[in-house]
Amino acid sequence: MYTPSLEKYIDVIEKCDTYIIDFQGEPIVTKFEFLKALAIARVYGFKEYEKALTFIKLNYSSTIEGKEAERILDQVFDTRHPWYRSVISKCTSWVPS
């Protein structure tokens, strides 16, 4: 099974940043933002993924991606669940600084 390296995910983040600027104002920007959030999760961990999803939720709330970001935040990042803190610490402990 093929597993992409961290460098490939970093490349995705950089390309998404470029395309977000190049296609500013176009509907495809939300898709690049969502793809970027997924790559951020792989490279930087759970907390940075949460920040990226929050950005999408706040800035693109009326789009499919904004609604999906909100759903993920509500279901996965619900801090009321007792397991949340332990998952966060486990998922961020391996992330390089």
Image (tube, rainbow, N blue to C red):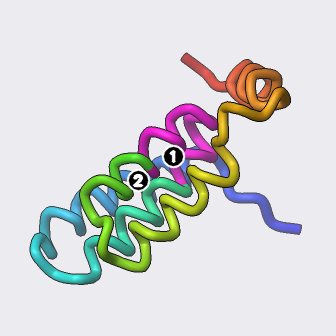
Q: Which residues are magenta?
A: 39-53
Mark 2 or mark 1: which comes first in sequence? Answer: 2
Local crowd at mark 2 within 10 Å, few (<14), some, or many (≥20)? Answer: many
Disc ID at residue 4: none
- Whether residue 31 is situated above or below residue 97 in the rendered picture: below
Local crowd at mark 1 within 10 Å, few (<14), some, or many (≥20)? Answer: many
Disc ID at residue 13: 2
* Pointers 2 and 1 in contact (C-beta within 8 Å): yes
Percent coordinates x, y for residue 11 in the rendering: 44, 54
Which residue in the rendered view is the most extreme toward the bottom?
27
Percent coordinates x, y for residue 95 in the rendering: 65, 25
Type of amino acid under label 1: Ile
Type of secondary structure dominating the magenta stretch = helix
Quadrant hosting residue 60: bottom left
- Whether residue 62 is situated above or below residue 54 in the rendered picture: below
Q: Please report the residue visible at 81 percent of the width from the left and 66 percent of the height from the top.
A: 2
Type of amino acid under label 2: Ile
On the image, numbered disc 1 is attached to which residue? 40
Q: Nearer the viewer, mark 2 or mark 1?
A: 1
Q: Please report the residue visible at 84 percent of the width from the left and 30 percent of the height from the top.
A: 83
Is disc 1 placed on a helix, strand or loop?
helix
> In front here: 90 or 43?
90
Q: CA distance from mark 2 to mark 1?
A: 7 Å
Asked if residue 73 lies in the magenta stretch, the reply is: no
Q: Please report the residue visible at 82 percent of the width from the left and 22 percent of the height from the top.
A: 86
> In front here: 18 or 52?
52
> In front here: 46 or 19?
46
In the picture, measured across the screen, residue 49 lies left or right of residue 29, that is right
Percent coordinates x, y for residue 20 in the rendering: 22, 65
Percent coordinates x, y for residue 85 in the rendering: 75, 22
